Image: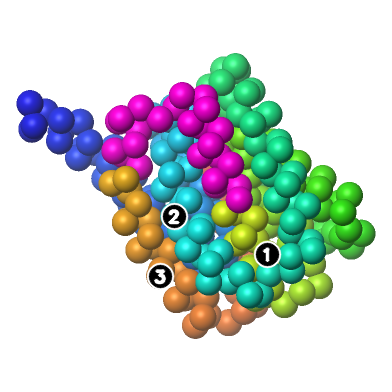
Amino acid sequence: MGQLILADFFNFAFAVSAFVAVSNGMIHGYTGFGGALIIIPVLTFLFGPIEAIAIVGLVTMFGAVQLARKTAHQTKWGEIIPICFGIAAFTPLGAWFLYHIDAEIVRRSMGGFILLFALILLSGWNYRGDRGLCSSSFVGAVAGSVNGLTGVGGPPLGLYFLSSPYSVEIQRANIVFCIAVLTVSMVIASAIGGAYSIDVIIRALLLVPIYMSGVWLGSYFFMLAPKDYFRRVALIILILTGLFTLVF
């Protein structure tokens, strides 16, 4: 019986999940977001969108909270607090649609959302409007809604903060904290929806140390790499992930 249980978890699906987890962890550690951009589409193919989002929520939450703790001193609190409220309020709304529409539509939506924001960044467009209460709350609402439905609410935040006039370090710190709120909201919504079976929790916990090692490596590379690489890396990740999710 013990061998049968182990075979249920340590198999080809786990090997793929582990490889993607460490790779996506590096992306999260480097850019501050993107912790779900690759791993959720891949796990959606393996387990379906509801289980994939639940697994990734638990896995990425540890890395997101750790990064937020380290970068909190660089965060622009007046700008991100309305965003965080928007995330917390609208993630449950997106999650309601996740549980009530076809899984294939959810998967295609993931790719569409990711690719849309990647193309906006590729065009060179930057948001130059007001960054007050209304605009920040709207961004939080969009990110929360996308997060609840697809688990990839990071791109709206990346677009908004990468367009800010702040230094790369502050941009990353703002993204990091909002992503932490995003992942915690996703875990709560998944728990309320009943997505956390024993199998889901075990799969998530097995991937946590693997993902965290990737986050550590990504954070290390951020300190070493030239800062002008930051936006380029984020853009490439968005484009490739969006295309992958739409095509396959």
The residue under the point 46% across, 68% down is 218
* Occupied quadrant, residue 131: bottom right
- The answer to whether residue 13 is above or below residue 82 is above
- Work out whether 125 lies above or below 30: above
Q: Which residue is at the front of the view, 190 or 203?
A: 190
Give the main secondary structure, helix, strand or loop, of the magenta stretch.
Answer: helix
Label 3 to label 2: alpha-carbon separation: 15 Å
**Amino acid on which disc 1 is placed:** Asn
The residue carrying mark 3 is 217
- Earlier in the chain: of badge 3 and badge 2, it is 2
The stretch drawn in magenta includes residue 201: yes
> Of 17 and 169, which appears nearest the observer?
169
Residue 36 in the image, given as x and y percentages of width and height:
51, 47
| Tag 3 and tag 2, C-beta contact below 8 Å | no
Identify the residue under disc 1.
Answer: 174
Q: Which residue is mark 2?
A: 62
Residue 243, image quadrant = top right
